Amino acid sequence: MRGGERLTSETAFEEIQRHYQQRDLAAREWRGNGGKVVGYFCDAVPEEMILAAGLFAIRLSGDPHGKTDVARQNVIPRFTNREDFVHSILNMLLTGEYDFLDYLVIPHTRDSIHRLYQLIAMMKDSDPSLNLPELFFLDSVHTTFFSGGLYNRDRMLELKESLEEWSGKEITSEALSRAINITNENKALLKRVASLRAAEPPCISGVEALQIISSSMFMLKEEHNKLLRGFLDGADKFPVRNGIRLFVSGSPLDSLQLFEIIESCGATIVADDNCWGNRYSNVPIDTSLDPFEAIADRYHNRSPCSRMYPMSRRLEHCLQNIMEAKAQGVVFNVFRHDAAEIWEIPDKTKALEEKRIPSVYFRNQPYLITEPEPLKTSIGELIETIQRSQ
Amino acid sequence: MTSERGAAQLESANAIRAYQREWLEDTRQRVKQGEPFAICNGDEFEEVFNIMDIPVIVINYWNSIIATKRMTEYYGDVLINRGYPANYFAMGLASTIDNNPETAPWGGLPKPALIIGGTKSDTEMKVLEIWAREYGCPFFPLDFGLDAVPELPKYPPPPRWWEMMADHWDELIDPRRLDLRVEEEKALINFIEVTTGRKLSMAKLEQGLELLNEQEILWGKARDLIAETIPCPVSLRDQLAVYQAQWHRGTIRGRDFIKAYYEEVKERVEKGVAACPNEKLRLMWMAGTPPSWAKWAEEEYGAVCVASLFSSIPIDSYYRATINGDVMRALASRHMVLFLETPDWRLKDAEIHQCNGVVETANPSIPSFNKQLFEEAGMPLCQIPRDRDDEEVRAILSDFIETRLLS
């Protein structure tokens, strides 16, 4: 935020957009001031612990518009799901775009993320001169059973120990509680954003919401909370949006491309089932429990990722959110070789048919959408279908 | 008996082939009479079912039967019609969705009491959950199943890891993951006992592991004879057909199948029987099914495929010694890590089989996982775009053999 500027909804959103577009801005500033930066993937890494350690947490994203040439020269692409995303990340790591990272925590989530860990570990091993961050593999199970929860808890303890080593200080329960309060406030504010987006009529677009939510993962949480409060202060003056209410489900979206295409057709994405979107802020941490245990519990039982068993939980979660947002139609978007998502779509489509909610399915999508017209045509047809039924 | 075209099929291999067909019919009858039947992902848990006398079909084996019967395209369409991708791992699911005993190989599978599989890949976990739902039976997911790529914490794995797998497997496997896996497998055994009424004891488990290890040792002895004998005494087709005995490991029958195989191979070596009397060059084929161009290569160049991706898996990967007398842990370790796919392991196989060259299918625009190490070690490697006996593949192989192996 520019110094001394009064924070209005407009200026707050401008600042949010700036951090969404320049995702390394806050991390580089932090590091420039002598702090250490911890990168991570997915929404499965406990940011609260990183914050409590006094380190800067930043979720890494790929760049669909970016190059992949250096990665492709260095990688033998075996068993790689979502190759274009994996190569994008590797390229950014190898060409210095992520040179501000001191550490990188990679969770055991989707196959593509697991593969990223193996590739980065292999590169570090084969060429120690590469400027790659120190790695921590946060192992976890893909079931939500009690015994798996205990396993995950033990791995969280190991992460805590590593964070303490990296920061040179103990992570106390008080520090964890403070961090939980900050992230819980963030989640509560993001829920207010979600409410305005799902309001009738909505007064926040999906494109705006995705930037607001995602930027939380690129900034200091206190700063983001400040921006959110400023943004929400003017909520009663937000212009309302007309148009068909759509819900988007599918592969993780670390860029605005798809949302922009959909909303350019006159619809509003009133909610989504995405770890860069609403799912990030769905579940707060229980403050009545011991803070470490509460964090471990929350990440074991968070809103279900498509990589988790069972699928029925995913289906229920998705349907519940569609109904709560009063979506009139659904867009399923699955990236090429995203095996975690692709098997769920028939169940979801069938359930929607039973509820007479029309949907459209974009399968085998490239990470970079170079031909938006066919998607726009399909969205247009979906909108027409909904309008005819009204 | 050796003819101009080489030795007849192994009797031991034919016995295994015949038994597999009988086994499914027998299983169908047993299920009709109320006995339980299980579907299990390969190398995940199936020997425990064997030890409990619960017939179990291994998913990759069932998929391979579907492929052999040329049903993959048909079942791919079945999946697509349901909105799923035409994924090879889901061929069994497709046969269940299709629910047509007239078209299914062997008349299709009987209804299982449960399906077992790992959560190790995005695809596997989903397919098995859907498959169980189609049958209306439980799916019991196990964490940290077998992975084809090197796993934690030994990444990259130590050189010559295969020499550690039998007796020092504990140094190759994450003990924290193994602790959980043992707990999950104990819970699964309880679940099977409750749902099927079958019982398991430590004595039976110990006996099963001993039989399993005996079977793999005999397999290793047969492998050694095949590798060291020129000309090769056993066709690759027979070597691979014998692999079906792996689905009966942990039983007397499984052990005896491979005992008969070893004795027949030994007899052939002693009598000087050759699979291909015209053998002039030895090749390693980097796949798990016989190459479609094998006959052409033998007749044209005397180039015989003597080894495959499966040649050393039994002895390098399946055998597990118990450590501190913990049978459950030894078995669970097997279920977590079978082998670590590394080029040095494959190179070792090509070398011990005295191969002149190696052939693999690969996209020429993608770097080979193995090529660099193989070429540095003086083991020529040929990439063909597909396993098909067509003009393009023959031209590539001819060029490889003539310029790299015969020049």
Image (spheres, rainbow, N blue to C red):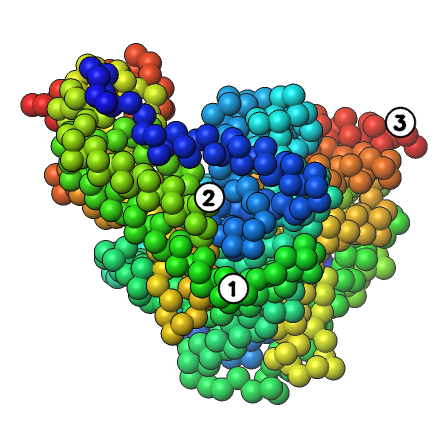
- Identify the residue position indicated by label 3 in the image: A388
Tell me the crowding category of disc 1: few under 14, some 14 to 19, or many 20 or more residues within 10 angstroms, Cα based: many
- Mark 3 belongs to which amino acid? Arg
**Could you tell whether A286 is left or right of B373 in the image?**
right
In this view, B234 is above or below A122:
above
Residue that lies at the very extreme toward the top in this rendered image = B391
- Mark 1 belongs to which amino acid? Arg
Task: Name which residue lies at 51% across and 67% down.
Answer: B202
Q: Nearer the viewer, mark 1 or mark 3?
A: 1
Q: Can see residue B270?
A: yes
- What is the number of the mark on residue A308? none
- Identify the residue position indicated by label 2 in the image: B247
User: Tag 1, which secondary structure?
Assistant: helix
**Could you tell whether A161 is left or right of A289 in the image?**
left
Residue B372 picture location, percent across and down:
21, 41
User: Tag 3, which secondary structure?
Assistant: helix
Number of numbered discs on residues: 3
Residue A371 picture location, percent across and down:
57, 28
Distance of label 2 from label 3 (alpha carbons): 57 Å
User: Tag 2, which secondary structure?
Assistant: helix
Q: Nearer the viewer, mark 2 or mark 3?
A: 2
- Mark 2 belongs to which amino acid? Trp
Residue that lies at the very extreme toward the left in this rendered image = B407
Task: Name which residue lies at 21% across and 35% down.
Answer: B267
Residue B388 picture location, percent across and down:
36, 19
Task: Name which residue lies at 63% across and 74% down.
Answer: A295
In this view, B265 is above or below B6:
below
Distance of label 1 from label 3 (alpha carbons): 54 Å
Instruction: Look at the image and tell me in which quarter the N terminus of chain A lies.
Output: bottom right
Q: Are marks 2 and 1 on the same chain?
A: yes
**Could you tell whether A247 is left or right of A17 in the image?**
right
- Identify the residue position indicated by label 1 in the image: B181
